[in-house]
Image (cartoon, grey):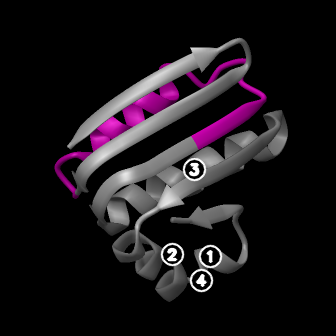
């Protein structure tokens, strides 16, 4: 998995590519936590993410808790494979998620 962050003022975009498994979740979490202070808009771009394990969902949920106090969060360009995970867990019903 590859994680790229782009901080533009108070907007943070986190781009994840490949497979976000249990072993990759700490890198994903670090990318978010190292940059989230002062952010009012958090965007996860999952256009090139083909798999996400529960450890990735945990990072997203913890990010959502932080952003509930700081601003907004959305997940964009979600692949069908990853969207299935969001639907199965019920997260698709409670988060701002845009499928491809």
Q: Which residues are magenta?
A: 21-43
- Which residue shows up at 81% across the image and 33% down it? 70
Label 2 with label 1: CB-CB less than 8 Å: yes
Closer to us: mark 3 or mark 4? 4
Name the residue that disc number 2 marks.
Answer: 86
Identify the mark nearer the N-term, 1 or 3: 3
Q: Secondary structure at mark 3?
A: helix
- Which residue shows up at 45% across the image and 25% down it? 5
The Cα–Cα distance between marks 3 and 4, rounded to whole angstroms, is 16 Å
Closer to us: mark 1 or mark 3? 1
The Cα–Cα distance between marks 3 and 2, rounded to whole angstroms, is 15 Å
The Cα–Cα distance between marks 1 and 4, rounded to whole angstroms, is 5 Å
Label 3 with label 2: CB-CB less than 8 Å: no
Quadrant of residue 72 within the rendered picture: top right
Q: Is residue 84 above or below residue 2?
A: below
User: Residue reaching furthest front?
Assistant: 100
Name the residue that disc number 1 marks.
Answer: 92
Name the residue that disc number 4 marks.
Answer: 90
Name the residue that disc number 3 marks.
Answer: 62
Q: Counting other residues with Cα less than 10 Å from the Cα at mark 3, is it few (<14), some (14-19), or many (20 or more)?
A: few
């Amino acid at each position: 998995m590859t994680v790229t962050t782009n901080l533009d003022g108070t907007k943070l975009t986190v781009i994840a590519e490949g497979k976000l498994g249990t072993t990759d979740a700490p890198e994903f979490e670090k990318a978010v936590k190292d940059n989230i202070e002062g952010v009012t808009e958090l965007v996860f771009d999952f256009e090139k993410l083909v798999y996400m394990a529960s450890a990735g969902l945990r990072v997203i949920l913890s990010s959502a808790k932080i952003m509930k106090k700081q601003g907004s969060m959305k997940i964009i360009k979600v692949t069908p494979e990853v969207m299935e995970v969001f639907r199965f867990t019920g997260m698709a019903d409670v988060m701002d998620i845009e499928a491809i």
